Image (cartoon, coloured by chain):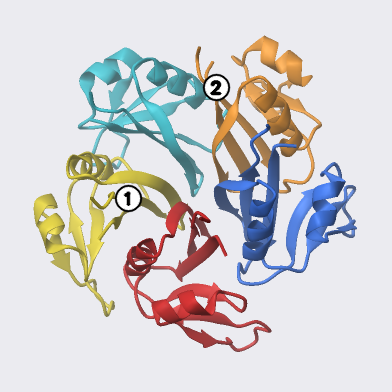
Chain colours: A orange, B cyan, C blue, D yellow, E red
Amino acid sequence: MPYMFISTQIRLENGPTNVGDEYSDPAVMNYLGARKTTMLGNNFSEYHVDDPPRMVLDKLEKIGFRVLTMTGVGQTLVWCLHKEIE
Amino acid sequence: MPYMFISTQIRLENGPTNVGDEYSDPAVMNYLGARKTTMLGNNFSEYHVDDPPRMVLDKLEKIGFRVLTMTGVGQTLVWCLHKEIE
Amino acid sequence: MPYMFISTQIRLENGPTNVGDEYSDPAVMNYLGARKTTMLGNNFSEYHVDDPPRMVLDKLEKIGFRVLTMTGVGQTLVWCLHKEIE
Amino acid sequence: MPYMFISTQIRLENGPTNVGDEYSDPAVMNYLGARKTTMLGNNFSEYHVDDPPRMVLDKLEKIGFRVLTMTGVGQTLVWCLHKEIE
Amino acid sequence: MPYMFISTQIRLENGPTNVGDEYSDPAVMNYLGARKTTMLGNNFSEYHVDDPPRMVLDKLEKIGFRVLTMTGVGQTLVWCLHKEIE
């Protein structure tokens, strides 16, 4: 699981922040304190936390994930992170 | 074929993920388990998989492709990957 | 606090520039001369300065933050900065 | 001419790909097999090829240009390439 | 002044290119041959040149500025450049 995405909608100063999908590493999701939910109308689940994205990035840096790039699509901001495999 | 694009529409947490065009390397398309299709009204074909983009990136890292950059255009998210030529 | 975001709306040639959220490092906010405000209708506060984003980036470089990436989302331009932890 | 832009509209899986402007290096345009055209209503000319952008990037890598970054603006995808000056 | 922005509207193949704000380094603005103007309705001034952005990047590389990242916001393309401080 070297790649990871986090995303937030509309405002970057507050949460919630989406931190994972159905197949995300449970150990990382647990470390972030993320909750697994299925949004109404979606046929897939996702993980989110209440922290704003900046705090999530700071936490992920401590376990080796670094921001590669960030982009906006529609009203969503997405960060793509990567962890070097030892 | 040092460059590669993958893309997904609207949501990044699930597939399908577009992984190639008509001229993509068949060995890489086969490795990803991609299917070649021609969308109604298009005069070109493309390759896609059911995996979400994060899992495709993880698989591509194993054969040497790394994310250079990512962007959103309209409702589509695009990743540009690169593999160093030996 | 290795990551930091700054953002501006519509025009990049002038301020104000948003430089922090509720949990931002007060020492960095003070260094930038930022004011904490809560926008009408928001349930969170943010920090901003009157300087244009270019001047904020120049100031932040002096204390070790470097631009990783920049993106547009809606009418907002966002810069993602990072400071190496010693 | 260390910098170069290429761009494509709407779909990234097929061409044409815009590869240059009026002042682009004729040797590089010739290497790519690009045609110079002036679009109706424009007061400037541009170069394009029928290849999809991925194939253009692969060709440009062979003569020293590498992708620095990519972005979407409106319905257009733009790649910014750079060649180190010896 | 380690950071610099340049931007252009709608088309990347021709100018004008916006190269600075009110507080930009006059020596760099002079080197680029930029004119300072105040657009109708704006309470701030900006610098622009007639060259397309690619030619501006080529000129700026000669005095040490390199492209860090590029993004689209609305109909505007923005490049963020950086010069290492000796």
Q: What element carries label 2?
A: loop
Q: Which chain carries label 2?
A: A
Q: Name the residue under label 2.
A: A83
Does residue C57 appear left or right of residue E68 in this picture? right
Please name whichever residue, A9 or E41, is drawn nearer the observer in this view of the structure: E41
Asked whether residue D4 is in view, the answer is yes
In the rendered image, the quadrant that contains the N terminus of chain A is top right
Q: Name the residue under label 1.
A: D81
Please name whichever residue, E7 or D83, is drawn nearer the observer in this view of the structure: D83
Residue B64, placed above or below residue A58: above
Number of labels in the image equals 2
Asked whether residue A34 is in view, the answer is no
- Residue B13 locus on image (x, y percent): 58, 27
Q: Is mark 1 on a helix, strand or loop?
A: strand
- Residue D22 locus on image (x, y percent): 21, 71
* Type of the residue with mark 1: Leu
For marks 2 and 1, give the CA distance: 26 Å
- Residue C39 locus on image (x, y percent): 87, 59
Asked if the residue under mark 1 is in contact with the one under mark 2, i.e. CB atoms within 8 Å, the reply is no
Does residue A65 appear left or right of residue B63 in this picture? right
